[in-house]
Image: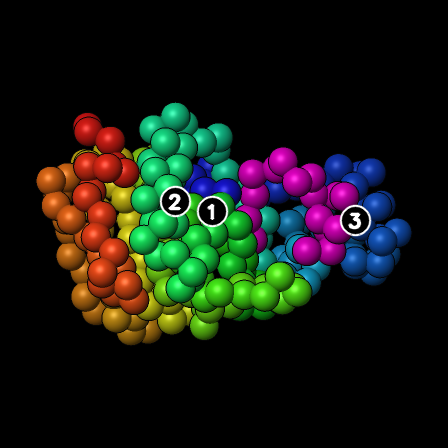
Amino acid sequence: MTTTRTGAIRHFTDAEMEAIVVAGIVEAGERGTLRAGRRFTVDEYLALGAAGILAKEERIELLDGEIICMAPIGNRHRNSVNWVAHLMREPIGRRAMVQVQAPIQLDDFTMPEPDIAVIRLRSINDLASVLPSDVYLIVEVADSSLEFDLGEKLARYAVAGIPEVWIANLRAGELVVNTKPEGAAYAHVRVIPLGGTVSPQAFPDVVLQLADFVPAV
């Protein structure tokens, strides 16, 4: 999934709340907190999916314990994500994996689904969550979500120690490259215009033309 955020919290119907209790995810006495907007751990969030209460096709992610609804992906956004993944896979080769719109567990209460994550190679039998220590690079494609991606979302990545985050700004046709996380911010931020090139710091031999994955404004 992407990070285009509507700001809406995913609420549960009475039938869903009953299913959550029956599945043993929360205690019966917590129905009231569910109705009020209870915060969930990552384990509880995953259990909601395993129980079929959260559907696979729902556009949601867990941020600070809140299940956040996200807006549909537009054509420009989808095309940019597809091209980033396409351009990275071959040159990175077998050194890392390019993960597309899949979860990363930042802490016990936060599991976003960035557009692209370049992660360490993992065994087919490694079923553990992808953690910040597994991540070389995150790429978020941003249009309506730009303020959130550059603010609240980027701060979460910094706190988690994600070493590099690219924000593809579709509004301005540029790329914001963030490196050296320090606290809730990145110490090194540079903006690359549409005619420029960029390389992941973990793979400096991989050179991408910005115009190949960010559409003209």
The answer to whether 99 is drawn above or below residue 211 in the figure is below
Q: Position of residue 156 (x, y in %)?
A: 41, 62
Mark 3 and 2 residues: CB-CB less than 8 Å, in contact? no
Alpha-carbon neighbours of circle 3 within 10 Å: few (<14), some, or many (≥20)? few
Q: Which amino acid does label 1 sit on?
A: Val
Tag nearer the camera, 1 or 2: 2
The kind of secondary structure element at disc 2 is helix
Report crowding for label 1: few under 14, some 14 to 19, many 20 or more residues within 10 A (C-alpha).
Answer: some
Inspect the image, locate mark 3, and give the three-letter code of the amino acid beneath it: Ala
Label 1 – label 2 distance at C-alpha = 7 Å
Label 2 crowd bin: few (<14), some (14–19), many (20+), radius 10 Å: some
Who comes first in sequence, dot 3 or dot 2? 3
Which circle's residue, 1 or 2, is located before the other in the chain?
A: 2
On the image, the x and y values in percent for residue 61 come to 55, 48
Would residue 83 appear left or right of 199 to someone viewing this image?
right
Pointer 1 and pointer 2: residues touching (CB < 8 Å)? Answer: yes
The residue labelled by disc 2 is 85
Q: In this view, does 157 lie above or below 4?
A: below
Magenta region includes residue 28: no
Circle 3: element type: loop
Amino acid residing under circle 2: Ala
| Residue that label 3 marks | 51
Q: Which mark is residue 168?
A: none
Q: Is mark 1 on a helix, strand or loop?
A: strand
Looking at the image, residue 127 sits to the left or right of residue 13; the answer is left
